[in-house]
Image (cartoon, helix red, strand yellow):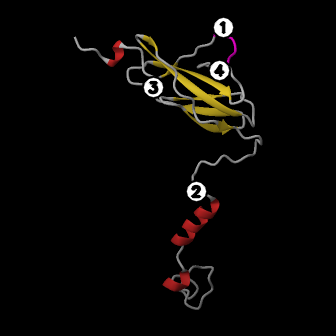
Amino acid sequence: PALKVIDYAPLAPGAPRLKAVSKDSLEVEYAAPPGSSHVSIRVRPVHATIWMPVDSSSGRLVKAAEGASFAFAAGAKCVVKDLEPGTAYVAVLLAKNGMGWGIWSSESPALQLPDDPMAVIVTSSRSWAERDAALRKRAIDVDAVGLCCAFCKSARCSSLNGG
């Protein structure tokens, strides 16, 4: 009989991706290896050495395993709450299938949570200057194309001349 992916413990998942949601929470996005049923997520501040599991029901880091569930659905996202503002975090994943737990993923790139609750989290790769330049490119020079509006007060304006 041929062996299948599910005949072995899962391979290591790819490194998770982190995104700031607020000053004290982050989103962990992940994809589990094929055949995985669940993943376990561990998070730690960059300066710390101990990984803390994320409770799948509360989304909080837990120090003691009592009453916590560490199994997340394979191939989804989770939001980790009640983190320290201004701290940089990293995450790792562990996948599970019918044969057991696999091996840990590589560490995610570090994500620094904002200090200021009013800090703007950039979700685009364009700066304001790039955005403004793109808008200027698309802008129509009203006088050049002979268009008008109710506010231009031009003698050619059809809206002011009953046209």
- Position of residue 127 relative to residue 26, above or below, is below
Q: Is residue 61 magenta?
A: yes
Rendered image: mark on residue 126: 2
Query: Of discs 4 and 2, which sits in the foreground?
Result: 4
* Helix, strand or loop status at disc 2: loop
Q: Residue at x 68, y 30 (%)?
A: 46
- Mark 4 to mark 3: distance in Å? 19 Å
- Mark 4 to mark 2: distance in Å? 34 Å
Q: Which residue is mark 4?
A: 51
- Type of amino acid at the residue the image marks with label 2: Arg
> Residues in magenta?
60-67
Q: Residue at x 66, y 32 (%)?
A: 89
Q: Are marks 3 and 1 in contact (CB under 8 Å)?
A: no
Q: Residue at x 58, y 68 (%)?
A: 133
Q: Earlier in the sequence, mark 4 or mark 2?
A: 4
Which quadrant of the figure has residue 141? bottom right
Q: Classify residue 73 as left or right of residue 160.
A: left
Residue 163 in view in this figure: no
Q: Which residue is mark 1?
A: 66
